[in-house]
């Protein structure tokens, strides 16, 4: 075997292992091949082609990252809107923020509750009829977990008559 045949694979592994590129991204392959064909047709030297390919891959990965981030943001917004609409339609839901407010809403056993933050970093829990309702104050809690514990029992008790 020649030195070139035995040295190619370890060299390729060393380049892949020691650079920040990681494994090749197949989504960028076509663009890189087009760039390589265009540059070799123009007679560009190999070091310049490698530099151009590196820039092409950097730009492509950044473009893919931004597209994935935008898609993720859009999906999260759609999920949030779906949660809001389920709550507003009367379905039992876990804690949901409605309309970007700081208050959180929950519907358990057909009853709606609002958990609103106070100025002293505590939480006021209200039993409400709808989102605009001021509601009846149930209590003030230090952390959301305490309000959850109270709700796990309160939601299934008979309706208060106050």
Image: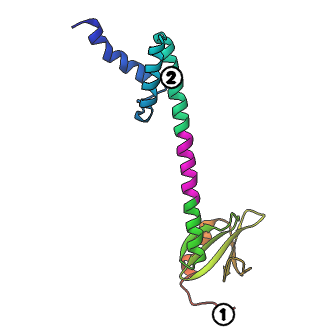
Q: Residue at x 53, y 84 (%)?
A: 156
Assign the N terminus to one quadrant of the image. Answer: top left
At 42% across and 33% down in the image, what residue appears? 25
Magenta span includes 140 = no
Residue 66 horizontal/vertical position (percent): 57, 41
In the picture shown, does residue 60 fall above or below 14?
A: below
Q: Which residues are magenta?
A: 65-77
Q: Nearer the viewer, mark 2 or mark 1?
A: 2
- 2 and 1 marks in contact (CB < 8 Å): no
Depth check, front residue: 15 or 94: 15
Find numbered disc 1 in the image and state the secondary structure of the residue it sits on: loop
> Upstream in the sequence, badge 2 or badge 1?
2
The image position of residue 160, as x and y in percent, is 63, 90
Mark 2 lies on residue = 54
- Secondary element type, mark 2: helix
Label 2, label 1: how many angstroms apart (C-alpha)?
Answer: 71 Å
Helix, strand or loop: magenta stretch: helix
| Residue 74 marker | none
How are the colours assigned in the image? rainbow
Residue 73 part of the magenta-drawn span: yes
Q: Nearer the viewer, residue 6 or 149?
A: 6
Residue 118 on image: x %, y %: 75, 67
Left or right: where 76 falls relative to 31: right
Label ID, residue 161? 1
Query: Mark 2 Cα within 10 Å, few/some/many (few <14, many 20+)?
Result: some
The residue lying at 42 percent from left, 25 percent from top is 33
Q: Where does residue 120 sit, x and y in percent of width and height? A: 77, 63
Give neighbour class at mark 1: few <14, some 14-19, many 20+ (Cα, 10 Å): few
- The image quarter containing residue 126 is bottom right
């Amino acid at each position: 075997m020649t030195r070139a045949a035995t040295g190619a694979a370890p060299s390729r592994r060393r380049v892949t292992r020691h650079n920040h590129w990681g494994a090749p991204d197949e989504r960028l392959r076509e663009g890189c091949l087009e760039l390589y064909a265009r540059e070799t047709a123009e007679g560009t030297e190999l070091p310049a082609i490698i530099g151009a390919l590196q820039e092409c891959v950097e730009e492509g990965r950044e473009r893919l990252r931004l597209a994935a981030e935008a898609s993720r943001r859009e999906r999260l917004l759609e999920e949030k809107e779906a949660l809001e609409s389920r709550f507003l339609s009367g379905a039992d839901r876990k804690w949901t923020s409605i309309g970007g407010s700081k208050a959180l809403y929950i519907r358990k056993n057909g009853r709606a509750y609002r958990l609103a933050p106070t100025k002293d970093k505590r939480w006021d829990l209200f039993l409400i009829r709808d989102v605009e309702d001021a509601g009846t104050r149930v209590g003030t809690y230090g952390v959301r977990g305490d309000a959850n514990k109270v709700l796990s029992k309160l939601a299934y008790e008979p309706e208060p008559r106050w």
